[in-house]
Amino acid sequence: MVIQKELIFPENIKFHVLLEQLNHSVFFDIETTGLSWRTSHLYLIGAAFMENGCWTLQQWFLQKPSEEKELLLQFSSFLSGFTQVIHYNGQGFDLPYLAHKYEDYRLPDPFAHMESLDLYRMVRPFRSLLSLSSLKQKDVERLLEIPRKDCCSGKELISRYQEYLGSGSEELLRLLLLHNHDDVCGLLPLYSVTAYSSLRSGGFTVSNPVFEEQRLILPLQLIIPLPRPLFAGHERYALEAKGCKAALTVCGKEGTMKHFYDNYKDYYYLPLEDEAIHKSVGVYVDPAHRQKARPANCYQKAAGLFFPQPYPRFSPAFYAGYRQRPAYFLPDDCWPDSGQKLKDYASDLLEEIITQAR
């Protein structure tokens, strides 16, 4: 059984700004009678795609388990008109399940030469920052205020499908189709979570930095607006992002730091001064007041207001102690002379914040 209809969404639903450009992409989800492809079978596939300027839903429903191969063939033929599949946790379940099914029936895998985008993997790094209790599709939909009429889980529907096979009940069929309908339709507004991945991968520009008291503020203009705000931070860095605007705040640290020289064998350490000097100069120092430098004491000290950098992009890099992260820099000594270097620094800060929040 194949059902097709045009999709109509409530006016308050927010979509990704580039969603309508996905003419060669298809959103899909499957329903099965179990998790193992060996002991279960596929009974429903739903796919949403752009057709004549409108989003359309097509569902393939298996009325007899013996017709599973035919369902797979129909879906494979349908996919030939697309270059990308978009799904939610499809990398973890849908795609491997279908690949095994196609292989078991000795059919070519239609996904082998298609691009794949897993929205689950797009949102997963931001779970803590978005205060998500879980990464189930329904929980992310609630965060984005995506409505859903279906109130059953995929697991609950397995027994409903078994009942349908025995009764042919129209009401059971409606429930089965509704669950898949809501799963697939939810993927379209859920596509907006790719904005977080865009931010993480450098989808922004950096405006003129602002120094405020002992803080450095980097204003960001995002290429794609975020569907929900992000707020995060710890003792050194903070992020506030809403819509197309974001700000990274870096807390400075007043004091004395050390710049360590790599080629320590070329230096003498002066205990009284607590610094290292090059041997070309140190040769004139009384041997009683100098010693061969070691990696841990081969440094030059500096005082001022230092700002942390997750990776030592700005040179000279300073540290509180030997091999102690993070690195620091003095803006007066090494403020970036290019927008790209400043953007790289912002990307480092974002990655550190995202990683720390996990």
Image (cartoon, rainbow, N blue to C red):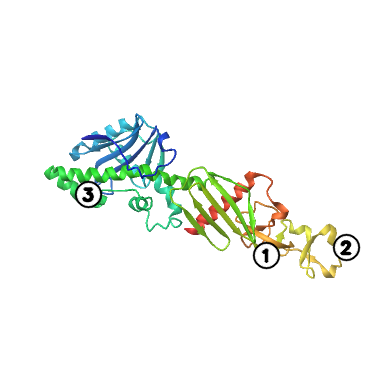
Residue density around tag 3, few if under 14, some if 14–19, many if 20 or more, within 10 Å: some
Residue 69 quadrant: top left
Q: Earlier in the sequence, mark 2 or mark 3?
A: 3
- Depth check: 76 or 28 in front? 28
**SS at mark 1 in the image:** strand
Residue 30 quadrant: top left
Given this view, does label 2 or label 3 mark the residue nearer the observer? 3
Q: Earlier in the sequence, mark 1 or mark 2?
A: 1
Instruction: Using the numbered discs, state the Cα–Cα distance from disc 1 to disc 3 in whole angstroms.
Output: 61 Å
Percent across and percent down for residue 160 are 18, 49
Q: Is residue 352 above or below residue 338?
A: below
Q: Tell which residue pokes out farthest to the front in this image.
A: 11
Q: Which mark is residue 284?
A: 2
Q: Quadrant of the N terminus?
A: top left
Q: Earlier in the sequence, mark 1 or mark 3?
A: 3
Percent across and percent down for residue 319 are 67, 61
- Depth check: 348 or 109 in front? 348
Instruction: Using the numbered discs, state the Cα–Cα distance from disc 1 to disc 2 in whole angstroms.
Output: 34 Å
Q: Which residue is mark 3?
A: 157
Residue 116 quadrant: top left
Residue type indicated by callout 1: Glu
Residue type indicated by callout 3: Leu
Residue density around tag 2, few if under 14, some if 14–19, many if 20 or more, within 10 Å: few
**SS at mark 3 in the image:** helix
**SS at mark 2 in the image:** loop
Residue type indicated by callout 2: Tyr
**Whether residue 41 can be seen here:** no
Q: Which mark is residue 254?
A: 1
